[in-house]
Amino acid sequence: MSSRIRVVVAKPGLDGHDRGAKVVARALRDAGMEVIYTGLHQTPEQIVETAIQEDADAVGLSVLSGAHMTLFKRVLELLAERDATDIVVFGGGIIPDADIPELEQLGVAKIFTPGATTQSIVDWVRANVTQPVA
């Protein structure tokens, strides 16, 4: 069994732009993490199922569509229903500053806004996602 951090990177909803998600996935992989990229147009149910099946330590959501409040909330609800609240949820995209405190109240661990460096994301995941025990 691997002791590397496992991260599911997902694009929920109808947003068809995944360049940012792929850049983050590559940066996490290059930093030595195991990354599972789900591809475009994933439902919250598909994302949570993947995270549980893959024994993920974290889920990173990329949301550019404006549906971030609904999508993050649903992923968190489904994780709770599946008794998987130990999976850290973080994300980024086009998310208004005013929405970030509410997302954090829902249980999103961190939101990265446009301009965040891949190194800052890698550093945050390393510092905030529990390293699994081999």
Image: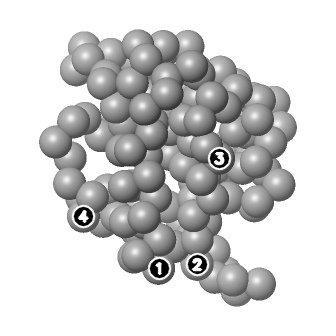
Q: Secondary structure at mark 3?
A: loop
Q: Tell me which residue sits at (57%, 19%) in the image.
A: 14
Left of 117 or right of it: where is 93? right
Q: Secondary structure at mark 4?
A: helix
Separation of residues labelled 2 and 4 (CA atoms): 18 Å
Q: Which mark is residue 38?
A: 3
Q: Residue furthest left?
A: 115
Q: Position of residue 104 (x, y in %)?
A: 41, 29
Give the labeled residue for mark 2.
4
Q: Position of residue 83 (x, y in %)?
A: 80, 41
* Amino acid type assigned to the residue bearing label 1 in the image: Gly
Q: Position of residue 58 (x, y in %)?
A: 57, 53
- Residue 20 seen in the figure: yes
Badge 3 density bin: few <14, some 14–19, many ≥20, Cα 10 Å: some
- Compare marks 2 and 4 and give the one earlier in the sequence: 2
Separation of residues labelled 4 and 3 (CA atoms): 22 Å
Q: Are marks 1 and 3 in contact (CB under 8 Å)?
A: no
* Amino acid type assigned to the residue bearing label 4 in the image: Gln
Q: Which mark is residue 32?
A: 1
- Compare marks 1 and 3 and give the one earlier in the sequence: 1
Q: Tell me which residue sits at (41%, 13%) in the image.
A: 66
- Residue 127 seen in the figure: no
- Compare marks 4 and 3 and give the one earlier in the sequence: 3
Give the labeled residue for mark 4.
119
Q: Are marks 1 and 2 in contact (CB under 8 Å)?
A: yes
Numbered disc in front, either 1 or 2: 1
